[in-house]
Structure formats: C-alpha cells, structure tokens
Amino acid sequence: MRSGHLRIDNVPLTRGEDGTPSDAYAAWLNSVGEGFYGKPSTGERLEQMFQSHQIDARVLTAVYDDSRDTKLVDSLVPVATYASFTKTLNVGDGLLPAHLVTTVTVRPTHRRRGILRKLMSDDLAKAKSAGFAVAALTATEATIYGRFGFGRCTEAQRMNLDVRGEVRFHAVPVGSVVQVVPSKLSDIAAEVFERFHTTQRGSVGRQEAYQRHATGAWGPDGQEPDPKTRAAVYLDDAGVIQGFVTYAFTGWEPAPITLEIRDLVAATPIARRELFRFMTAHDLIERVSYPAAAANDPLGWALEDPARLSYLEREHGLWVRVLDVQAAFAARKYTGSGFFTLRVADVQGLTSGSYAFEITEGTPEITRIEDSSKASIACDVQVLGPLLLGTAPIADLLAAGIVTLDDPSDLGRLAALVDLPGIPHAINGF
Ligand SMILES: CC(C)(COP(=O)(O)OP(=O)(O)OC[C@H]1O[C@@H](n2cnc3c(N)ncnc32)[C@H](O)[C@@H]1OP(=O)(O)O)[C@@H](O)C(=O)NCCC(=O)NCCS
C-alpha cells in the first residue's frame, strides 16, 4: 500500500542468499530495537530472534518513507514497525484464539501523522475478517489504545517479600522442590505453562522467547545466555512437576540483598505457594522480588506476617479488543438464567450494534438485534474487554460512568448474571 511517500509492506521471514536472515528483516528488527531503546541485533543475536519469530509465525509489517535520501539512510530501514501473531486467550470457560499485536513503533520524525492509526485500523479489520473474536496487546502507555477499542483487562504489580529471619507460612509444606540447571526446563517450562494457561482467566499463550528465557539461553537484556539464571521445579506428593521458578541474584549491593524472580509458573495454587516458600529459604538474602504479582495476589494470605510484603509498580497488563461480540461473549461463563440486551458504540464500526443475551443455566445464546434506545447495558467497545474477562464488577463500571443501564434498579440482577469471581491475571508480556 502507498500513501504519498509512505509505503506499507509485509516483511517476510526469509533468508538471504548467504543463508542469514534477510536484510529487510534485519532492518525491521533493528528499527524495533531503536523504538524501544535496545541495542542492535547482529550475527548470532539476529539469527536467534529470526528463529524465534519464525516459530511464532509472526506477520511483520513495515512502513518505509521513499522520500528519504538513501545516501543518509538505507531504504530498507522502516519508519514504523508493527507485528502480529496468534495465541489463545483464556476467557474463563476455555481458550479463544487471539490476534496479538506487538512491536509497534513509529520513528520520532514520523509521529502524529496517523501511521499507527492506519496500521492498527487495517490490521484489526483484517483480523476480524480472518475470524478472530478478540485482539490483544500489552501497552507501554495506558492512553494510546483505548481509541482503537482496547480495554485494560489485567493489572500486575511488583511484590517485594522481606525474607530476613524465618518466613513462616500458615500451611505446612507439601511436596518437594528440586533445584535444577535451567536447561532442564526445556521440556518442562512450556508444558507447565500450558496447564497454568488453561486454568487462569486472563492468561495469554506465550511467545517462544519465554522458552529461551526459562532455559537461561536468553537473559533479561537480550538474546545472550545468562549464567546468573537459577531454576527450581516443584513436584507434588505424587512426584508430578506442577511448577517452576527461574530467578537471579542481583548482587551484594545495593541493599537489600535480593533474589529477583524472573518467571514463576504454577499449575496449581499449592505449587505456587511452595515455590514462594522455597524462594524465602535462601541464606544471606534479604528480599525476594516478583514483578508479575496479581492485583489481588493471594501470597499475603499464606504468610503468618503479611507485613513482610510490600507492593509497587502497579501496572496495566493485558489490553483486549473485542472484534466479534457474539463469538467472544459466547466463550465465557455466566451464572444462572436470564435475559439482557447490550448496545455497543464502536467508532471503528467492527462491533457496533445491539445484541440480545439469553442465558440458560450459565450458557449464552447471543443474537444481533435491531438497535433501540433501550438497552439493559450500553457501553463503548473499549469496555467490552473488561466485561468479557470480568475485570471489574458491573457495579464498578457503572460507578465509573463507562456503562449505562436502561434501568439502574436492574443492577443486582445483571451483576448476578454477568460478574465473575475473582479477577483475571496475565503473567506474560508480548
Ligand atoms: C505510540 C506510537 C506508536 C504512536 O504512533 P503515531 O503514528 O505517532 O500515532 P498516530 O499519529 O497514528 O496517532 C493515533 C492516535 O494516537 C494518539 N497517540 C499517539 N501516540 C500517543 C501517546 N504516546 N500517548 C497518547 N496518545 C497517543 C494520537 O494523538 C492519535 O489520536 P487521535 O487520532 O485520536 O487524535 C509512537 O509514538 C511510538 O512509536 N512510540 C514509542 C514506542 C511505543 O510506545 N510503542 C507502543 C508500544 S505498545
């Protein structure tokens, strides 16, 4: 596609004649690196990223500015990047294929000219025609994506645990923890994650890079082995591996002396608790830090002294954009039986309209209906993500002024049908 000097092209994941990743791919990747202030990828680092992106089957898009002087900048260097790939989203009653958007960058010289708007609008329309009911992303800034219909669905916070002295848990220890070299996680990490993923509402399937991080092949700063990575697995009483943790010592200074949890995946709540217990059992360590705790993390309930926990860096995590109301909302749970209508305003036009929900013993039948000024629930498309995943009770969305009810006295009945227990949580970024 061409617009003025700007040209939008797909960047195929192909190799050049010498067998290395194509120059177009290398330029695309390094443009992403520049957008996020990373270091350039060449040689083995480039090769590894290429392989990982191939395994994810990413669809890469670049915007080129053909008016630039090629004596100053190579014509293969994009002014904007964008990518997507497919994973699943756990909506509480199963896994829904999700169109994941990532590596969105626009060069400072080309910002605020509508490049992101063009890339995003085209891509969401394509994803909808391809049959996706939802798109999702993890955003660097909370104010960018609402205008494209994405709603904030999960939050994560850094949880610091003061581990000086004996950390006591209410529950007695169960099962066992074995410290392993990280390479032992090569089969375990993906398998345990899949079991976690099928049980955790809000969880999104993982890109292949997580596997490389778990095994220590990639460190937190890039595609190089990280000898500091440590790992342990949790086995239940039957000897089945139910969780793993990877972590690193961050140095003797500055205080407090800290073990940083890089990844902790547990297929059961007991596995999670026991992995945290293991993390508190390291001599000389004063603090254990975990960046992906849920906003309602249960660890505080497990400790005899919950004051050992402190929380900071609470951040929005997963943003979901509903593309097909009927398919998305048919995939989640309801409680009991009842009827309501939902009217959606969507400036991109992908979901606008009214829908009737007939719920029979928790199972929905959703049909499109003629628009009417009376709808049990009315909202903008960006509220559909949180409604779908049950991020907040409907009473909170009403109090926030982001849904309206035709009959406010109907709130209790609607909440009983639609609200979900607990909150969704995602432990990955992409
Ligand atoms: C964020 C970014 C991709 C926007 O690209 P862009 O091409 O300048 O955006 P557009 O010109 O298409 O703007 C689209 C809309 O988003 C808004 N917008 C763009 N960047 C924004 C920001 N950082 N914060 C809030 N709103 C923003 C624009 O005002 C515009 O709004 P409007 O159409 O409703 O008036 C670009 O600034 C960037 O690359 N930033 C650094 C990397 C980054 O943060 N990427 C996002 C990763 S999740």
Image: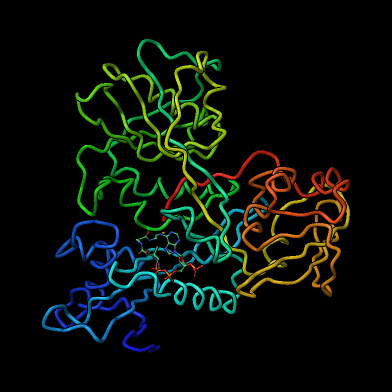
- Residue 405: give x, y in percent of width and height: 81, 54
* Quadrant of the snapshot with the N terminus: bottom left
- Residue 265: give x, y in percent of width and height: 45, 40
Which quarter of the frame holds ligand 1?
bottom left
Residue 308 relative to residue 215: left or right: right
- Residue at 55% in and 44% down: 425
Of residues 160 and 427, which is closer to you in this image? 160
Disc tally is: 0
Q: Is residue 149 above or below residue 72?
A: above
> Which picture quadrant has residue 71?
bottom left
Residue 105 relative to residue 399: left or right: left
- Residue at 40% in and 33% down: 290
Q: Is residue 391 above or below residue 359?
A: above
Colour pattern = rainbow
- Residue at 37% in and 83% down: 8
Of residues 269 and 405, which is closer to you in this image? 405
Of residues 147 and 8, which is closer to you in this image? 147
> Which picture quadrant has residue 89?
bottom right
Residue 35 relative to residue 245: left or right: left
- Residue 170: give x, y in percent of width and height: 55, 15
- Residue 285: give x, y in percent of width and height: 29, 20
- Residue at the farthest top position: 165
* Quadrant of the snapshot with the C terminus: bottom left
- Residue at 86% in and 64% down: 374
